[in-house]
């Protein structure tokens, strides 16, 4: 018997109790995703790339309601997208590099498209699985042609093209 086989035989079957952690983390991951997508939509990282800001100034500059802004920014800190030093918020190194619209390294176009176009369609996954019907733009147009629907709306096309560049 090899050493690894012996160790496996000696390990009790109950060594690792089931945990709901992975299930809940994945099942609620849309909370973190939507927090990031909203921050990109409101250009939080582009604003903070200019210079760090305190809560009140940042809330005012972004036009947020004071009731929810502290929780929103602190959630972005907890997720690692922002840093907070006392009362001053700033971008993390990654968000400063990748999510400032004024930098050539900006990858937020893909996130903008995910937020505007894809997020709502994924909300219909259960319907698509049960009916077999498409749930994207083509289903809304009724013609089944995703790109025809995309080209029919100049704003939607602009978001798509930004995502692809």
Image: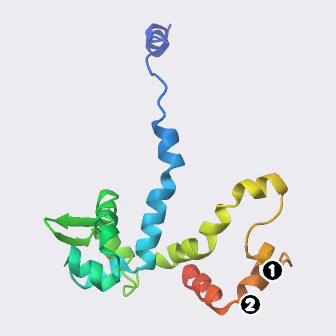
Q: Left or right: where does residue 87 sit relative to residue 77?
A: left
Instruction: Inspect this view and state whether residue 150 appears.
Output: yes
Asked if residue 52 shows in the view, the reply is: no
Report the quarter where the C terminus lies: bottom right
Q: Quadrant of residue 122?
A: bottom right
Q: Residue 104, percent across and down?
A: 40, 85
Name the side, left or right, on which 18 lies relative to 76. Answer: right
Spatial CA distance of label 2 from label 1 is: 10 Å
User: How many labels were placed on the picture?
Assistant: 2
Count neighbours of disc 1 (C-alpha within 10 A) and say few if under 14, some if 14 to 19, many if 20 or more.
some
- Looking at this view, is 53 or 105 the one in front? 53
Considering the numbered disc 1 on the image, is that residue within a helix, a strand or a loop? helix
Horizontally, is 164 left or right of 38 in the view? Answer: right
User: Compared with residue 152, is residue 127 higher up or lower down, i.e. above or below?
Assistant: above
Residue at the spot of label 2: 152
Tell me where residue 100 sits by quadrant: bottom left
Whether residues under marks 2 and 1 lie with C-beta atoms below 8 angstroms apart, the answer is yes
**Residue to which mark 1 is pinned:** 141
Which circle, 2 or 1, is nearer the viewer?
1
Which residue is outermost to the right?
143
Furthest-bottom residue in view?
154
Query: Where's residue 105, x and y in %?
Result: 40, 79
Check disc 2: other Cα within 10 Å, few if <14, some if 14-19, many if 20+: few
- Residue at 45% from the left image edge and 37% from the top image edge: 21
| Residue at the spot 15% in from the left edge and 66% down from the top edge | 85
Residue 74 to residue 144: above or below? above
Point 71% across, 84% down: residue: 150
Residue 83 percent location from the top left of the image: 24, 65
Q: Secondary structure at mark 2?
A: helix
| Numbered mark located on residue 116 in the image | none
């Amino acid at each position: 018997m090899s050493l690894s086989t012996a160790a496996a035989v000696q390990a009790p079957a109950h060594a690792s109790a089931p945990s709901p952690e992975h299930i809940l983390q994945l099942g609620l991951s849309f909370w973190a995703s939507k927090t990031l997508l909203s921050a990109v939509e409101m250009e939080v990282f582009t604003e903070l790339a200019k210079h760090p800001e305190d809560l009140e100034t940042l809330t005012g500059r972004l036009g947020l309601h004071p009731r929810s802004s502290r929780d929103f920014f602190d959630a972005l800190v907890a997720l690692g997208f922002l840093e907070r030093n006392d009362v001053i918020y700033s971008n993390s190194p990654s968000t400063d590099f990748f999510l400032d619209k004024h930098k050539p390294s900006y990858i937020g176009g893909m996130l903008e498209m995910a937020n505007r176009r894809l997020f709502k369609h994924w909300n219909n996954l259960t319907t698509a699985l049960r009916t077999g019907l498409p749930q994207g733009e083509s289903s809304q147009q009724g013609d089944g042609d995703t790109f025809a629907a995309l080209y029919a709306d100049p704003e939607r096309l602009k978001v798509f093209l930004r995502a692809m560049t």
